[in-house]
Amino acid sequence: MAKVPVQFTLNGSEKAEFVDSGTTLLHALRDKIGDTSPKGGCHQGTCGACSVIIDGELRLSCLTLAETCNGVAITTTAGLSEAGVLHPLQRAFLEAFATQCGFCTPGMIMAAKVLLDHTPNPSRDEVVEALSGNICRCTGYEPIIQAVLTAARSNSQNAA
Amino acid sequence: MELRKNYFADVRKDDLHEIGQPRPRSDSPGHVTGKTAFFADRNFPGMLHLKMVRSPHHHARIRSIDASEAERHPGVVRVLTAKDVPHNVYTILILIQIGPEDETVLADGKVRWKGEAVVAVLAETERAAQEAVAKVKVDYEVLPAVFDMEEALKPGAPLVNEYHGQNYYLYDSGECRKVRFGDVEAGFAGADHVLEQSYQSSPIEHAPTETTGCLVVPEGNDRFTCYTNTQAMFFTLDNTSIILQMPGSKLHFVGGTVGGGFGGKVDVIVEPIAILGAKLTGRPVCFIYSREEEMQISSPRAAEKIVIKDGVMKDGRIVARKVTGYTDAGAYSRHSPYGAQKGAGHYPGPYTIPNVWIDTYCVYTNRTPSSAMRGFGVTIGDFALEVQMDKLARLIGMDPLEFRFINAYRDGDMKAHRQPTEGAALIECMQEASRAANWPVAEKFMAMTSYVKGA
Amino acid sequence: MALALQTFATVKDANAALKAAGTRYLGGGTLVIRAANEGDVSVSGFVRSTEPSLSTIAVAGGKVRIGASVTMSTISRHADLGALAKAARAVGGPAVRNMATIGGNLFAPAPYGDFAVALLALDAIVGTDDGEAPIEIFLANRYGSAIVTSVSFALPKADSFRFLKVSRVKPKGVSVLSIASVLELAPDGTVSSARIALGCMADRPMRAKSAENALIGQSLTKDGIASALAAVNDGTSPATDPIASAWYRNEVLPVHLGRLLLG
C-alpha cells in the first residue's frame, strides 16, 4: 500500500503524516492525528457532522482526500477555544441549550463559524441557510439558530 | 408563555431549588469543544474491521455458503458463519422474561428478511472487508414472502418464522393481548351513533446521526472491553454472555454516550458478533453500521394498523370502545411483543368508558424486524385515538375539546384494566390548554376537577 | 486493494490513466468518494487533473466558458453569472457547494444533478479532450465519456432564465424535481422561443419539447400556458425513490411548471 505524505496546519499548528493514498481527511484527522472533533455520521456528504474549515471555506472532511490538503490551513471545533476560553459560538451553544446528544455539534459550530466570519450580523434566514447542510436528528434546530444569532450579537457588542 | 400555577396548589411545593431553574447541561462543555468521547473516538493499533454479508432476499433457504475466496482475499483475517457462534440465539429481553428465542446472530439455514446477517468478515481495512464481502457466495432457494399483516394472518400465508409456528406471537392470553371490560356489544346496541375507522402507519427509522456500532479490545485473560453506543448496556452484557457462553465477569462494557438513539440502539445486535470476532482473532475489532445499514438494517418503529369502533351518545358520552391493534414485528420478535402488549395497556386512552374490548396482535412478516422507538406501542395508538376523538366530536356536532372534558378520566374512575384512576390531571391540563391556546370551553368544564367526578 | 489517487498536470495524461479498469475521475469528491465510502468495490482508484484551465471562468461577447472543476459556490458568487446563482445555490448545503463541481454535476444521477438541468435549458456545449458535444447528446452517453474539461453557453438575456427546485425539506433537501427554462418573448409579450428542462423526470435531465412547442405564440397567462402544462408530462419516466414516487412526480410537475411560468 502506497503511503503518501500530507502536511498542513491544523488549528494553527504544523502537522505532517504519512497516510495510505485514498485516505479521507476525516480518517486522517481522527485516526492519525487524533483530532476526533469531526464526526463520521454518514460518509456521504449528507449530515455535515464531519465539517471542517479549509482555507476559510466550509468543507466535508469525509469526502475530501487527505493528500489533496497539502499546504492548507484547517480549523476544527477542537481548536476554537483559546487558553481554555470558549469561542463566542461555543459559549452561546452551551448557554442556549443548543446541544442534545452532541454528535452534530462540532459540525454545526464549524458551519456557524464560517457564516459569522463572512457575515458578522446574519439574518435568521442566513443562519438557517448556513446550517442547511448539517443535520441534528435530536431536532434541536431552534436553539441552535438562536445560539448562532446570540453569538453574532455578542461579537458585534465586543467589536463596538 | 406564562402558565397558571393554582392547580393542585395543596399538593405541590413551590420552594424547589432545582426544578424550574435553568441549569447548564453537565455534558455540554464536552459537546461544544469536541471533547466528548463517543465510542468511535478511539483508535487501537491492529484494529480489524467487521463487515456483514447480508441477505439480498426477503425469504430464502440457504443451500450453501462458500467463503473460501473471501478467506483468501488479501487483508482478510477471519470469516464467521453460524457454526462459529457458540449459542447462536438472541434473547434480547430475557432479563425481564419477555420475548422468545426466535432470532439468530448469523443466519442458520434460512433468511427471513432482506438484509439479515449471514456471514461476518473481519479484515485489516474497511476496504478489504468490503471487497471480501462481495466474494462470499451464498446459494439461496428463494421462498414466497409476505409483507402485509392481514395477508400474513390469513390461512395459507407463507410461514415467516418456524419458531412460532404461525405468523403471530402467542401470548399467555392466546393469539393476542386482550382487555375485556363491561359488555361492549350491549354498549354499541344502546349508542346513538357507532363509528368504526381504521388507522395505519408505516415503519419509521430513528436515523441517529451517529450510526450503531462498537469497538472491542481483548484485554488478555480472556477479558474484553466493549466501547459501544448501546442504549441497553446490561441487556447487551447479559445477552453477549449467553451468546458467547462466557461469564459476564469477562465482559467490560463502556458506554453511556450516544449520538442519538431514540430507541434505535436498544437492540443487542453489533456487540456479540464483534466480541466473538475479537475473541477468535485476538485483535481489536470495530463493527460500525454504514449510513445505508443504519437506514435499512437497524430496526425501525413498527408499522401498525389500528381499528377503532366507538359507540357514542348525542350528549357526548362514549359508551363503548372496541380496539383491534396490529403491530408489524417484521421477521423476528425483538421488542415487538412487548410493544403490542403496551398498546393493549394504553387503550382506550385517558377516557372513562364503561364498555371496552381490546385485542392487540404482534404479527410476523418478511420485513425488517421492528423494535423500540420513543413510546413504541403507544405513540401511533395515540394518533389514532385522538383523530378518532375529533371524528366523534364532529359526528355529534360537539366542540372537540368539550367532548374530551366529558370523557376525561378522573380520580376514582375504574379503568378498563380494573385499576382505579389516581393522580389524573387531564382535566386541569385541558383547562390550561384551553386558556393558553385561546380555545374557550363552557364554564362548567372550567369548573371541573380531576378530584371528584361530576363536579 | 487500496484506493490510491493519481494526480496529473494535464487532462490528457489523466484521460490515459482513466483507461485502467476501476479508476474514476475525482472532481469535488461528492460522488466518487461517497461511492467508495459506501463500499462500492467497482471503484478501485481515483484520477484527477490539476490543469489550470479546469478552474477558470471566461466571459466574453455574451458567451461563457466554465472550467469543469469550478465549484457551485464559485458560480453562485461570480459577478457575471448572477442569473445562474439560484441554480448553483440549489445544490447541496454550503459545504457541498464548496466542493461540488460543474463537471461533476453532469454525472450526478437523479434525484441529484440540479445544475445540469439548468445547463440543459441553456443548451450548453460540453467540452472534453475528444471535442465538444451538445449537452443533450452528452447526457445520453455520459458515463463513457472522456474527462469533461468545460461547459459553454450563451449568457441568457436578462430575466429569460428561470429555475425552480422542488424539495420537501426546508430550506432545502433532495429534489422531488427541478425545472429550468429559457424563454424569449416577442414585443407583444407572446413566447417566441422556449427551452424547458426537467430534472428527476427521467434517468437524466430531459427537455420538455411538447411543452416548449405548446408555449410558442402564447402569452404567459393562466390560459396561455394551459396547453403547455397539459403536455409537460409527455415522455417523462421518473423514478420512484425515497424522495417521491413516479406517480407523485408526474402529478405535481404541471403544477410547478405553472408556478415557474407565471411566477
Image (cartoon, rainbow, N blue to C red):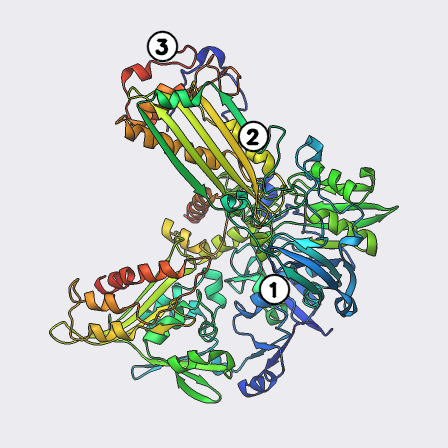
Mark 2: few/some/many CA within 10 Å (<14, 14-19, 20+): many
- Residue bearing mark 1: C37
- Position of C183 with respect to C173 (left or right) is left
Provide residue B276's location: percent of width, then percent of height: 78, 50
> Which of the 4 image quadrants contains residue A66?
bottom right
Q: Quadrant of residue C253?
A: bottom left
In the displayed structure, would residue C232 be above or below residue B297?
Answer: below
Residues at marks 3 and 1 touching, judged by CB atoms closer than 8 Å: no
Q: Residues within 10 Å of mark 3 (few under 14, many from 20)?
A: few
Mark 3 vs mark 2: give the one in front. 2
Residue annotated with mark 3: B455
Same chain letter for marks 3 and 1: no
**Residue identified by numbered label 2:** B177
Residue C86 visible in rendering: no
SS type, badge 1: helix
Amino acid carrying label 2: it is: Arg
Judging from the image, mark 1 belongs to the subunit labelled: C
